[in-house]
């Protein structure tokens, strides 16, 4: 999608993305090697009752779904940051994740008219409709001067 295609109130959906146990453990071993992400036996006896994905892995999946659904081929080039990030429920092996992205604000920068600013909220839900990610993102787009 191009920057001009976004508008406040718009809802973009994507998915599902199915989380495999091998992917969950592989990501955790490389980037977040805590036992409840990497050790199925220990995790089974924990408060989680089994392996759970790293929250950062969950964010990466959301990013992939957003790129596939909206940012591929766009003028997007950066993000200055997040307003918040929350993981209300864990992601588990076998979960089918669905993205719902709500566009909050779309505007051109007053100081830099070649800069488009998009504020949106990304939420991921599993197959039981439990929210597993809630994040508000600002994305920047390179635009032609108007």
Image (cartoon, rainbow, N blue to C red):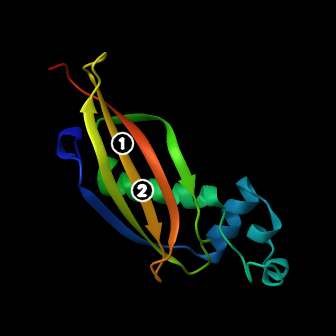
Pinpoint residue 36: horizontal percent, then vertical percent. Answer: 78, 70
Is 7 situated above or below 47? above
In percent of width and height, residue 68 lies at 35, 56
- Furthest toward the left, the residue is 146
User: What residue lies at 52% left-to-right and 62% top-to-bottom?
Assistant: 133
In the displayed structure, 7 sits above or below 125; it is above
Q: Label 1's element?
A: strand
63 relative to 9 in the view: left or right: right
Q: Position of residue 8 (x, y in %)?
A: 23, 48
| Number of residues whose C-alpha sits closer than 10 Å to that of mark 2, classed few (under 14), some (14–19) or many (20 or more) | many
Foreground of the two, 39 or 139: 139
Which residue is at a point 25% across and 33% down the rendered structure image? 107
In the picture, the disc for residue 122 is 2
Which of the numbered marks, if any, corresponds to residue 119?
1
Please state if 144 lies on the left or on the right of 81 as rendered. Answer: left
Query: What residue sits 26% from the left and 21% below the top?
Result: 114
Asked if residue 14 is positioned above or below residue 78 in the image, the reply reads below
Other-residue count near label 1 (Cα within 10 Å), few / some / many at <14 / 14–19 / ≥20: many
Depth check: give the residue in front, 89 or 96. Answer: 89
Task: Name the outermost residue toward the top.
Answer: 111
Quadrant in the rendering for residue 44: bottom right
Q: Indicate the position of residue 22 as horizontal and vertical percent values.
A: 65, 73
Looking at the picture, tell me which residue is in the foreground, 122 or 97.
122
Quarter of the image containing the C terminus?
A: top left
Find the distance from the CA under tag 1 to the CA under tag 2.
10 Å
Q: Residue at x 31, y 64 (%)?
A: 13
Position of 135 relative to 108 (above/below): below
The kind of secondary structure element at disc 2 is strand
Residue 72 appears in the figure: no
**Which of the labelled discs sits on residue 142, or is there none?**
none
Q: Is residue 4 visible from the viewing direction of this image?
A: yes
Q: Nearer the viewer, residue 123 or 52?
A: 123
């Amino acid at each position: 999608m191009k920057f001009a295609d976004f508008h406040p109130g718009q809802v973009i959906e994507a998915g599902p993305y199915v989380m495999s146990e091998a992917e969950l453990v592989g990501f955790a071993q490389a980037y977040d090697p805590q036992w409840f992400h990497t050790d199925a036996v220990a995790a089974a006896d924990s408060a989680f009752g089994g392996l759970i994905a790293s929250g950062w892995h969950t964010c990466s999946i959301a990013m992939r779904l957003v790129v596939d659904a909206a940012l591929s081929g766009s003028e997007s080039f950066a993000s200055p940051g997040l307003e918040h990030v929350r993981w209300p429920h864990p992601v588990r092996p076998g979960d089918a994740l669905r993205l719902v992205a709500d566009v909050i604000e779309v505007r051109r920068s007053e100081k830099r008219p070649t800069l488009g600013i998009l504020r949106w909220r990304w939420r991921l839900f599993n197959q039981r409709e439990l929210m597993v990610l809630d994040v508000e993102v600002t994305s920047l787009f390179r635009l032609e001067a108007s």
